[in-house]
Structure formats: C-alpha cells, structure tokens
Image: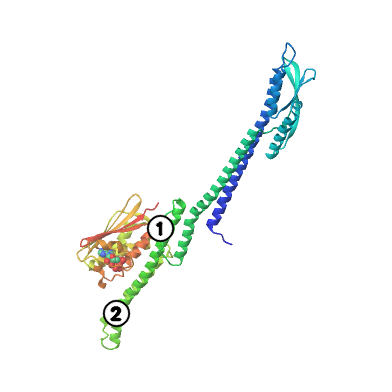
Amino acid sequence: MLRSLRAQLSLSILLILLVMVTLISAASNWFINREFEEYMIRQENDRSVSIVNDLGHQYNDLTGGWSRDFLHTIGMYSLYDGYILKIYGARGTLLWDAENHDMSLCGQIMGEISDRMKDAKKSGAFVTRTYPISRNGKQAGSVSITYYGPYFFTENDYRFIKTLNGILLAVGLLSAAFAVAAGTLLARRIARPISKTAYIATQISQGNYGIRFESTPNTRELQEMVTAINHLAEALSEQESLRKRLTSDVAHELRTPLSAVSSHLEAMIEGIWEATPERLQSCQEEIKRLASLVADLQRLANIEDGSLKLVKTRVDLHEIALTAVRNLESEGMKKRIALSACGSPAYADADRERIIQVVMNLLSNALRYTPPNGRVEVETFETESESILRVKDTGIGIPEEELPYIFERFYRTDKSRNRKTGGTGIGLTIAKSIVESHGGKITVESTVGEGSRFTVLLPKQR
Ligand code: ADP
C-alpha cells in the first residue's frame, strides 16, 4: 500500500526523535544514578572513619579511661543516622551497645532503612564491620558498626533521588511530546510543497497550463522545483498557443493563394475568362509561391526539430558575404540598388551552407524592402569572442512596435503585407533558428524611412 509522503516523513522523524530522546534520557538517568550510588558508598565509608575518629578522641591517655557520656552521645547520633555501634575497650570490655541501650529504637531504625531501600528497589543487607580505635599509635579499643551496605539512603537522600528521577522522567516525557510536535510540523513543512507540486504537475499533464504556484517555499531545492514547475507550465502553455496559432496561420497562408488560383481556373474552365498564357502564368506563379512556402515550412521544421545535423567547419563570414553578394548582384542591378560587401575576415565554427542561407535571407529581404537607388551593404568583423556579420539597407525600415515580432513565423509588417513583395514571412524565422542552433544571436535595429540593420553574432572558433 502506498503511504503519503507526509505520513512517511512524520513517522521517520518521529521515530528518530523518540529513539534519541529515549536514549538520552535512559543514559543520563543511568549515569546520574550510578554517580549518586558511588557518592553514597564513599559517604558511608567516610562516615565510618569519622565515627572511629570521634570515638578515639573520647579516650583519655593519662587515665586510660573513656568519657562514657560522649560515647553515648556519639552512639545515639550514629544510631539516628543508621549506624548501630558496639564500642569495646582495650581488653574487649563492652563500653556501649546501641541494642542494649534501646533495642526497639534500633529495630525501628533498621526496619525504616530496609523498607526505604526496598522501596527504592536497591539490593543490599545489613553488614557489621569492626574497626580498631587507635590513640597515639596505641589501640585503645574497637568498635563494630552495623549498617546497611553497600550504601543506604537517609530520608533526605531518598527524597532527593526520588525528585531527581521525577524531573528526569518529566524532561524525557516533555522532550518526547516536543518530538511528536516537531516531527509532525517538520513533515508537514517538507511535504506540503511536494504534494502541491504533484498536484500541479498532474493538472499540467491534464492540459491545465494556466495553473501556477503562488507561494514560494524558503528551502532552496524546493524553491528551485517550484520555479521549474512554473516555467514548465509557462513553456507548455506557450507551446500550446504557438501550436494553435501555427495551424491557423498555415491555414490562412494557404487559403488565400489557393482560392485565388482556384477561382481563376474556374473562370477559365467555365469560359468566362479566356485561358491566355498571361493568366495561366499568373496561376503558375501563385502555385510556385505556395510551393516555396511549403518548402520554407519544411526547412524550418527540419531546423527546429533538430533533425538537421549541422556540418561545422571553420568558415569565414567575410568570404560568405562576398559569395552572397555575387549571387544577388544581378537582382540588385535590376532594382538599381548598390549591393556591396566590406569589412574584414571573421572566422566561426559553423555550417557553411546554413550560414549562406541566413545571409541570403537577410540580403534578399534588404533588396526586397529597399526602393530603387538605395544601398545594401554587408559588413563583417571580429571581436574577441564573436564573429559578426551585419546587413545594412537604406530601405523602408520597420516600425519600432513591430520589431519584436518580425522573427516570428508568417509575420509581415503592414507595409509589406502587399503580396507583391513575394515574401512568405518565414525567412527571418529560419535565419533566427539557424543562428541560434549555432549558439549565436540575431538582432535588428531599424528606423522607418531610413533603413534597417540586421546583426548576426556567432561565437568564435576556439
Ligand atoms: P518575408 O518573406 O515576408 O520577407 P521575413 O520573415 O523574411 O518574411 O520577414 C518578416 C517581415 O519583416 C517582412 O515581411 C518585413 O515586413 C520585415 N522585414 C524583414 N527584413 C526587412 C528589411 N530589411 N526592411 C524592412 N522590413 C523588413
């Protein structure tokens, strides 16, 4: 079964955090308790030593006697602290015995201690140890101390360790609760843009190209993904409208000449018009135009879908310009336009045939849109990184507002709408596709009534 990203993330983060919290709590609990136990054991030993020392001070060297009152006080204090003493003199005479003194109090105190230790789930038992009591290097007596070993808690100790354990448990629980909250929140934060992307991608795949991400996440990768999806939607929507427009444009372009030829032929068949050679020729010209339009479209399609492989060699744009000028010289002369090439050699790594096609397209446009007695000039030169070819004319120019569109398919400026110019509106689109497939750029500057300047920039051969 497929689980949602959010559920999986929540579960994973939660599991990691819970394991961490449990481990940290358990480890700190264990270490603190162990340290405390060691402290208690040291404390018990110290206490025994201090009892023996205190007792030693009660021996009088000179008289060889004991201050019995103080022995009693020390014995009682020790008893209340959980240490049951039996004090003997040098010859083993019993000087003071807690059990003799108050049997029931001893029993009560021992009972309390073992209950407390059982309550704290600590194992241990009462042990008796005998220590010699020395005074100035001589043994003055001995004391046997009975206490709960290896350590025991007093009432205060027990309260302290209980509170400490309570605090540790509370911190653990609080951290676990925080882990649950943080895990869920984090998972939601990560998963939300991803599930939104999935939703938007599905919408796009269903043809809803208008959909976009409104909010941008503040994680770099997620933001990149959102931007990419938005771009994808935009590109697809552009492609879609281009495809629709292209179909209607092609239909439009074909319909006009086809209906003209059709009506002319009809008139001739029905005998309304006499089929003179001129009329037949005019029909043939329309058909030729249609054929060249279809050929242009085919060429453009080949370039755009990448099926046309570029055969790149080191070419000199200046040499290409000279060839193109030579090819169009007679046409220029016919229109009384001065056609020339100038500049210096400019080398590029390019497909010669394709670049010739670009230059021919630009030059024939220049000739087509330049009135008689005008000038058309091709200039070539190099910069550090680019080889440049420029076609300048003194023609009709292109209105500024139309400049952004002239490289689009079938686009013709109003002035050239006139079919007499013979253009198909695809020449510049082909030129742009070829230049761009070389990694280059084509730009235009133009002033109505003064002329235009098309610039082709190709990356230089490395
Ligand atoms: P066409 O075959 O109609 O010339 P192009 O794609 O080559 O198609 O050019 C598109 C349009 O750009 C032309 O119809 C024309 O309006 C304009 N144009 C192109 N070159 C020039 C130029 N040198 N001078 C003026 N207008 C131009």
Q: Residue furthest left?
A: 373
- Reading the chain from its start, which is encountered first: label 1 or label 2? 1
Instruction: Give neighbour class at mark 2: few <14, some 14-19, many 20+ (Cα, 10 Å).
Output: some
**Up/down of 358 relative to 253, above or below:** above
Q: Which mark is residue 260?
A: 2
Quarter holding residue 7: bottom right
Q: Identify residue for label 1.
A: 214
> Where's residue 270, x and y in %?
29, 88
Which residue is nearer to you in this view: 123 or 273? 123
> Where's residue 286, x and y in %?
30, 77
Q: Amino acid at mark 2?
A: Ala
> Where's residue 171, x and y in %?
57, 42
Which numbered mark, 1 or 2, is in the foreground of this view? 1
Q: CA distance from mark 1 to mark 2?
A: 51 Å
Which residue is nearer to you in this view: 188 or 348? 188
Q: Is residue 409 left or right of residue 49?
A: left
> Where's residue 431, x and y in %?
34, 63
Q: Is residue 56 left or right of residue 285?
A: right
Can residue 180 be seen by looking at this rendering?
A: yes
